[in-house]
Image: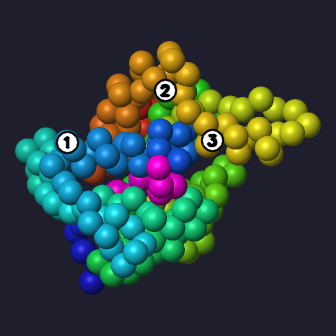
Amino acid sequence: MTSDFWLIVGLGNPGKKYEGTRHNMGFMVADVLASRWSVNFSDHKGLALLGRGVAQLDGQSFKFFIAKPLTYMNDSGTAVASLCSYYSIDPSHVIVLHDDMDLDFGRIKVKAGGSAGGHNGIKSIDKSLGTPKYGRVRLGVGHAARGSRAHENTINWVLGGFNATQRRELDEFLMDGADAAESIMVNGIQKTQEKFNGR
């Protein structure tokens, strides 16, 4: 029997050297939600930092887990599949928060299903869950310079930090990402898309 818990997963890489980088947008939004919902993280089998609780949203109670995988980005699916299996959570109750280079900084797109768009964390989760049909909050970080060293540029870009203007806007952007995750729980994917995708 599936549980009525939601699993919200922020993607990123563990460790000091990755803190505050574009690729850790998912971790940052997970931290905003954890602070908003007064949740502390503890270790789950060495695979993820995990918090749990009940959120009161729009007069309703939602039981949730928030996870930050410790497996490094490209193996995120191992942690997500383990949590879904352990707590009997259906993929339709999974929301993944992640950076997206196809969107300009500050843009948010919500989706369920569809392509991984070259994001290795999403590819790993699709493979481990056996389906792409879970909620995704895509957080725009803009694109690296394209050209002959595109692959190298991309790696340096996602593991790089934000410029001064972006840093000023970052807190509000992260709160928008957290709002989008809450909206999926309360209103579902489609209504949340209508609210956030056109901004």
Q: CA distance from mark 3 to mark 2?
A: 15 Å
Answer left or right for 59 relative to 192: left
> Magenta residues, as a range?
8-16
Q: Is residue 14 magenta?
A: yes
Q: Which residue is mark 1?
A: 36
Q: Amino acid at mark 3?
A: Val
Q: Nearer the viewer, residue 123 or 25?
A: 25
Q: CA distance from mark 2 to mark 1?
A: 20 Å
The image's colour scheme reads rainbow
Question: Residue 181, labelled with which disc?
Answer: none
Tell me the quarter of the picture where residue 182 sits.
top left
Q: Relative to 24, does residue 53 appear above or below in the rendering?
A: below
**Percent position of residue 137, x then y:** 45, 45
**Percent position of residue 167, x then y:** 45, 23
Q: Is residue 75 visible?
A: yes
Q: Nearer the viewer, mark 3 or mark 2?
A: 3
Instruction: Sort mark 2 into few (<14), some (14-19) or many (20+) by Cα contacts within 10 Å.
Output: some
Question: Residue 158, labelled with which disc?
Answer: 3
